Amino acid sequence: MILYYSPGACSLADHIALEESGMKFTLAKVDLKTHKLEDGRSFYDINPKGYVPAIQFDDGQILTENIAILSFIADNYPALMAPGQNGRYRQLEKLSFISGEIHKAFAPLFKPGSTESEKAAAADKIRKRLSEIAAQVKGPYLFGEHATVADFYLFVTLLWAVKNGIDLPQPLKTLSEHVRARPTVDVALKQEGLA
């Protein structure tokens, strides 16, 4: 299996989850400005959408989108699944919120040419969404004592928040510290040149 990633992008969540799972995979770095792989091939040939993450299975099939990839990893490594009878659905609920409400809200902060007022409005929206999810944290991690794939996705967005000067609510500071302390996170950050 190959994980197509860009350093510090949302694909970092998938990278951490794959490290946690012990699944065998290799990395393929994507330059998101040129949409090229390190070997010069066009990433559009792998993922016509042009963005990461994407995983390529050994049979050549491609899977894209964080929610799908993280769910695939958790389905194959249940220790990364939210607990309880409806754990899978609660995890999908959190992944959807992180993707649609938090991740997406960062667009004006990443997009060249955004005005200062657009950036300020984005930061305000991110603060609101982070406060909402902070109120739902059930322990050191989103669902309690054990990390799930949703924690890894949230962690990446928290890195972005800090980088953009957005203060984190205390439950999210604690969550971020717990995730960052995991050896697999250190491995992923080093492999992506971020630590």
Image (spheres, rainbow, N blue to C red):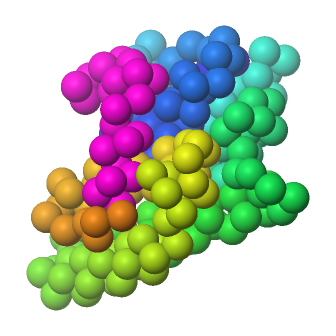
Residue at the (33%, 54%) spot, across then down: 174
Q: Position of residue 16 (x, y in %)?
A: 50, 31
- Classified by dominant secondary structure, the portion drawn in magenta counts as helix
**Among the 4 quarters of the image, the one containing residue 115:** bottom left
Please check the rendered image and state whether residue 177 is part of the magenta-colored stretch, yes or no: yes
Give x and y (percent) for residue 20: 57, 25
Find the magenta span and give its range: 172-195
- Residue at x-position 78% and y-position 15%: 58
Against 139, residue 1 (above or below) is above
* Residue 116 visible in the current orientation: yes
Q: Which picture quadrant has residue 76?
A: top right
Quadrant of image for the C terminus:
top left
Q: Residue at x 58, y 43 (%)?
A: 146
Residue 100 location, x and y as percent? 55, 71
Q: How many numbered circles does the render carry?
A: 0
Q: Quadrant of the N terminus?
A: top right
Relative vertical location of residue 129 with respect to residue 156 in this rendering, above or below = below
Residue 24 vs 5, above or below: the answer is above
Classify residue 157 as left or right of residue 101.
Answer: left
Q: In which quarter of the view is residue 72 placed? A: top right
Is residue 2 found left or right of 178 in the rendered image? right
- Viewer-closest of 20 and 124: 20
Q: In screen coordinates, is 128 left or right of 119?
A: right
Residue 97 on image: x %, y % = 58, 70
Depth check, front residue: 97 or 33: 97
Is residue 32 in view from this perspective?
no
Q: Is residue 107 magenta?
A: no
